[in-house]
Image (cartoon, helix red, strand yellow):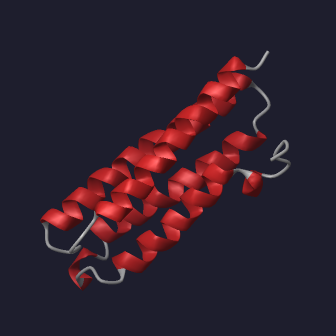
Amino acid sequence: MGKAERFQDLEVWQCAHKLVLEVYRVCRMFPDEERYGLTSQLQRAAVSVPANIAEGFKRLGKGDKVRFYNIAETSLEEVKYYFILAKDLGYLDNNQQLLDDAETISRMLFRLIQSVNQRQ
């Protein structure tokens, strides 16, 4: 694939966006009393991942790009914890695919950051 012209062209953004859609789908199964607790926290953290990738994409400076991509990484780690918590609370029967998808995105973000850091 050639140079990305829009953030939507980034495979990592596409995967992160799909994860957000899945997060919203699974959150519908959480108890109503979690609407302003775990559901809200998980959704906000998940949305932060592709949003920060999008924002970082338009940043001109290498440091700015990396900072936003790193924020996406840290939000993704928060999402992973919420997947673990949701399973332990009995809200998810199986969180393994969600964790695997998040880990794949994590590796992609790491490679994106490496790529930005190697540019002249």
- 103 vs 95: above or below: above
Which residue occupies the foreground of this view, 3 or 53? 3
Q: Nearer the viewer, residue 9 or 53?
A: 9
| Residue occupying the point 68% across, 46% down | 55
* Circle count: 0
Q: Residue at x 42, y 79 (%)?
A: 25
Quadrant of the image occupied by residue 66 = top right
- On screen, residue 3 versus residue 107, left or right, reads right
Q: Residue at x 59, y 54 (%)?
A: 50
Image location of residue 68, percent across then percent down: 60, 37
Q: Is residue 67 above or below residue 37?
A: above
Q: Can residue 37 be spotted in the picture?
A: no
Q: How far across and down, in percent of the image, does residue 36 sit?
A: 31, 72
In the displayed orientation, state which residue is furthest to the left: 89
Location of residue 84 in the rendering, given as x and y in whole percent from the top left corner: 23, 57
The image quadrant where one finds the C terminus is top right
From the viewer's perspective, tell me whether residue 55 is left or right of residue 50: right
The residue under the point 42% across, 65% down is 43
Q: Is residue 110 above or below residue 52?
A: above
The image quarter in which residue 31 lies: bottom left
Instruction: Give the residue at the far front of this rendering.
Output: 1
- The answer to whether residue 83 shows anywhere in this view is yes
